[in-house]
Image (cartoon, helix red, strand yellow):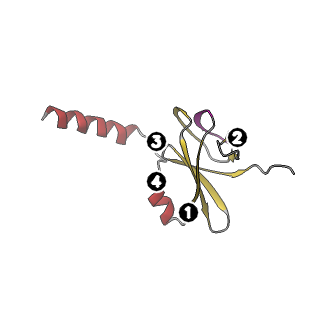
Amino acid sequence: MRTVIVFAGVLLVLICCGPAVSEDLESLAKEGYQVVEETRVAGEFKGCDARTALTFTNGKVFICSSYAYSFSVYMPAVFILKKQGNEIKVLINGIAYSGSFLEHEK
């Protein structure tokens, strides 16, 4: 019984205190997004704000246009998602960030 109470308390804290913009792949798929690639943030991740550049281990650089902070995480997984019309989001730690990729000069 005590285990159930502790579990319920932890679950309540996670629900109440988690990021309000938390999304998952299923909800993004319902909006028309599809996963086109999986990678990781190269180094530490603390969130995104306008014009933040995130470097991924696949060599791509994502420029954020949305704002949200995250607990500091080292090399979290990244899902790169696209929607018809080339709208792009990346999903990191359950939060979807809007933005675009920096094009490499040739």
Q: Which residue is mark 2?
A: 53
Residue 33 circle label:
1
Asked if marks 4 and 1 touch (Cβ < 8 Å), the reply is: no
Magenta range is 43-52
Q: Nearer the viewer, residue 46 or 55?
A: 55
Sequence-earlier tag: 2 or 4: 4
- Decide: marks 4, 3 in contact (CB < 8 A)? no
Asked whether 77 falls inside the magenta stretch, the response is no
Q: Is residue 30 above or below residue 47?
A: below
Q: Earlier in the sequence, mark 4 or mark 1?
A: 4
Q: Are marks 2 and 1 in contact (CB under 8 Å)?
A: no
* Residue for point 67% across, 68% down: 85
Which element carries disc 1, helix, strand or loop? loop
What is the x, y in percent for residue 15? 35, 42
Residue ID for mark 4 = 24
Q: Nearer the viewer, mark 2 or mark 3?
A: 2
C-alpha separation, residue under disc 2 versus residue under disc 3: 21 Å
Under tag 4, what secondary structure?
Answer: loop
Q: Earlier in the sequence, mark 1 or mark 3?
A: 3
From mark 1 to mark 3, how far is it between C-alphas? 21 Å
| Residue extending farthest right | 106
Q: Residues within 10 Å of mark 3 (few under 14, many from 20)?
A: some
Upstream in the sequence, badge 4 or badge 3?
3
Q: What residue did someone put label 3 on?
A: 19
Image quadrant assignment for residue 6? top left
Identify the residue at horizontal 46%, vertical 42% (top origin).
19
Q: Secondary structure at mark 3?
A: loop
Tell me the quarter of the image containing the N terminus. top left
What amino acid does circle 4 point to?
Asp
x and y percentages locating residue 64 in the rendered image = 67, 45
Q: Callout 1, which amino acid?
A: Tyr
Residue 35 picture location, percent across and down: 55, 59
